[in-house]
Every structure is written in structure tokens, then in C-alpha cells.
Image (cartoon, grey):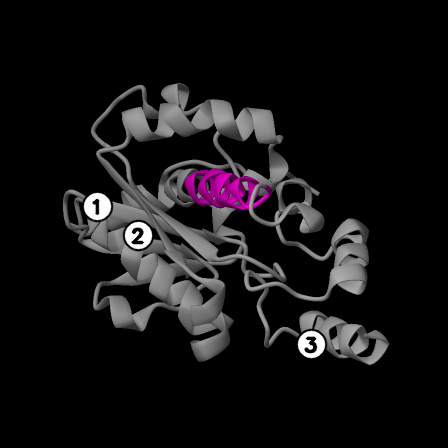
Amino acid sequence: MTEIETDLRYEWELHARGLALIAGLDEAGRGAWAGPVAAGAVILPLDRDDLIQVLDGVTDSKRLSANRRAALYPVITETALAWGVGFASNTEIDEIGIVPATRLAMRRALDQLSVKPAALLTDSMHFPEAKLPYTSLIKGDQKSLSIAAASILAKVSRDHFMIELDEPFPAYKFGQHKGYGTELHRLALREHGPCVMHRQTFAPVVRARIAHQERA
């Protein structure tokens, strides 16, 4: 199978329609059991001739190591015309559901932009409430450089948030698994039950809470 190339073709298609400022949007943490969902928004300077060269290596954040993402983060923020990161808390996720909370984080990321985009590119996310023209791309973070850059900002920002939870919640080792459903996280839930940073409506957390209460 041919590897998908991350480039600017979708940005330029929109630009050719007279939409000059294109924001790429992507999320991180949607499937985790604990912590917030994060979203990144990035507007790249499409008039910069060396843009693809400067952002060499920027692709789907899941394909990159933590060190590589951390190295690319300042490159993206220094190169972008505008960028932002937004969060929706685990409590908000429990209150409104993960998809609405993901869109809430995206709206907050857009609110951080210093200039208003004319159109959006999203990674498999319908986003009508943004009230802007948007294109939802399957595997968008592997196709669009703007979405890929947003995915890195979201992932690095959320990982940092989860690492900071190690101090107040050392028993859960959030800094290692970042709230995802690893065996390490599963064992911590089995031993201690959920904490206030867990998504209380997620099925694995519900099961862990019930099991912990039955053993108490």
C-alpha cells in the first residue's frame, strides 16, 4: 500500500476558491479513560515558499515518538501564522459526551487564534457549529499539513497535562499511560478505583468503580 503523503494540496484547493486563511483542526485524548480531550488549531502561512521544507517531518502525531513531537512543537508554533490549543475537561466529557466535548475543545482552540480563519480542515470530524466552511478528511492528519500540525500541538499539550497529574495522583501513573486503557492503568484502577480525573461515564471506569466498591 502506498503511504499517504502529508502535504498542502487540500489547503491550496480551498485557497484557490478564495479562502485565504485555512485552519487545520485535530484532537488528542478522545479514547482515553481519564483526563481532558485536547484540540489543536493551526493556520499555516501558505504564501511561504519553503513551508513544506520547514515543517519536514510533521505528520500524524501518532506516527511520531514523544521526543520527535516535542522537537516539532516549537517549529510549528514559530512557523504558524496563528495557532491555539483548547481543552474540554473529563467532567465536561461526562456531562455532554465525548463527541460534543471534542467539538467544545476545538471551539476553544479556534478562540485562541489571533486571526480568524476563512475555512477549516478537520480529521474525520463534522463541525457545523463552527459556522465556517469545513472539509472533514478521513485520515486527515496523514494528508493535510495543517491538520498534522494541529495534531502534534494537541498531543504534546495533552501529554504535558497528564504528566503534571503524576504529582497529585501518583498511584495512577498518568504520566506513563496518559490516561489510555493500558494494562498499567487497568491495574491501578483495579487497586485504587477511579479518581476525580477519570471519565466516570466511560464503561471501563464504571466497571472498575463497581468492582472496587464490591471489594471494599
Please give the residue where the numbered disc 3 appears in the rendered image. Answer: 206
Q: In which quarter of the image is the C terminus?
A: bottom right
Q: Position of residue 139 (x, y in %)?
A: 54, 52
Secondary structure, mark 3, is helix
Question: At label 2, which amino acid type do we have?
Answer: Ala
Mark 2 in CB contact with mark 1 (< 8 angstroms): yes
Q: Distance between the residues labelled 2 and 1?
A: 7 Å
Question: At label 3, which amino acid type do we have?
Answer: Val
Does the magenta stretch mainly form a helix, a strand or a loop? helix
Question: In the rendered structure, does residue 161 fall within the stretch colored magenta?
Answer: yes
Q: Position of residue 118 (x, y in %)?
A: 18, 53
Please give the residue where the numbered disc 1 appears in the rendered image. Answer: 113
* Residue 57 seen from this side: no
Q: Where is residue 74 in the image (x, y as percent from the top left)?
A: 38, 25
Q: What stretch is highlighted in magenta?
A: 151-166
Compared to 207, does 172 lie above or below?
above
Secondary structure, mark 2, is helix
Q: How far apart are marks 3 and 1 (CA)?
A: 37 Å
